[in-house]
Amino acid sequence: MYPHFVMKMYTETARKLEEYKGKYQQKVDEATRRFSHVIKDPNAVRAFPSDLLRATALDSSAPSRGPWKVTLQPHIYSTFLEFCPDETLRWNVWQAFTSRCSGYEDNALSTSVELEEVRMHRRDQSKFLGYKTFSDMSMETKMASSVDNVNRIINLLLEKALPAQEKELKSLKEFAKERGFDGELNPWDVPYWRRKQTASLYSQLEEGEIRE
């Protein structure tokens, strides 16, 4: 059993930790809510599936008529990157998503303070209970059981996964280039061209069969 004063400090630290985690999530939610981009060009949405058209159309009763509003909500953001043919639009939405809470657009939504507080209180929690780091404490209840085991597993996976990833990216770049894409394949381009490549390779299969 830990001394009473240790448990008291631990409880207070846990309370502060939850407080800052809550503040962090609030800022992420607000930054996600604030961004939107209205598309008026029908060519930019010509490949959108019906669900995405309905989700983005300002008039949901006429989804094909437009205009369409793109947001950073996960079910819209990820599908938009897969189906939008305009590279500039993809970059704009990707950049907005990845820079959320960085302070780039609005310093009031920066989460740097909250992240540092979470890190500090996690460190204190682990020290109170006699652990070297928060990661060591967390591993006590995980199947991997130790940080060293996690690092070992990651390195083993990397040995197999990295060559496969490089091969897939090379294939994707060649596929995009053959279809007129001129330039470097950036993170906001990958979902779009990966979808088109998958459709090309497995055009005779149903979506469920592709997943299998």
Image (spheres, helix red, strand yellow):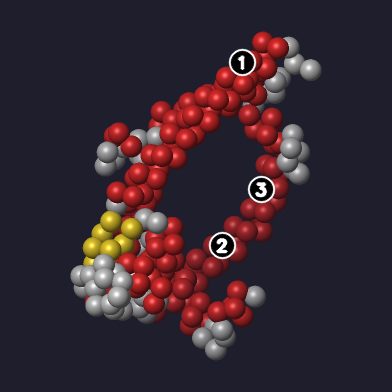
Residue 183, horizontal then vertical, whole percent: 33, 66
Residue at the front extreme?
A: 61
Residue 206 visible? The answer is yes
Residue at horizontal 75 percent and vertical 16 percent from the top:
2
Bin the neighbour count of mark 1 within 10 Å (Cα to Cα): few under 14, some 14-19, many 20 and up: some
Residue 75, horizontal then vertical, whole percent: 44, 62
List the residue tagged with mark 3: 154
Residue 190 visible? The answer is no
Residue 68, horizontal then vertical, whole percent: 27, 68
Disc 2 and disc 1 in contact, CB within 8 angstroms? no
Q: CA distance from mark 2 to mark 1?
A: 46 Å
Q: Is residue 106 left or right of residue 163?
A: left
Bin the neighbour count of mark 2 within 10 Å (Cα to Cα): few under 14, some 14-19, many 20 and up: few
Name the quadrant containing residue 188: bottom left
Q: CA distance from mark 3 to mark 1?
A: 34 Å
Q: Is residue 25 left or right of residue 37?
A: right
SS assignment at label 2: helix
Name the quadrant containing residue 111: top left
Residue at the bottom extreme?
A: 204
Name the quadrant containing residue 39: bottom left
List the residue tagged with mark 2: 165
List the residue tagged with mark 1: 9
SS assignment at label 1: helix
Q: Quadrant of the N terminus?
A: top right
Callout 2, which amino acid?
Gln
Residue 96, horizontal then vertical, whole percent: 32, 51
SS assignment at label 3: helix
Q: Earlier in the sequence, mark 3 or mark 1?
A: 1
Q: Is residue 35 left or right of residue 75?
A: left
Callout 3, which amino acid?
Ile
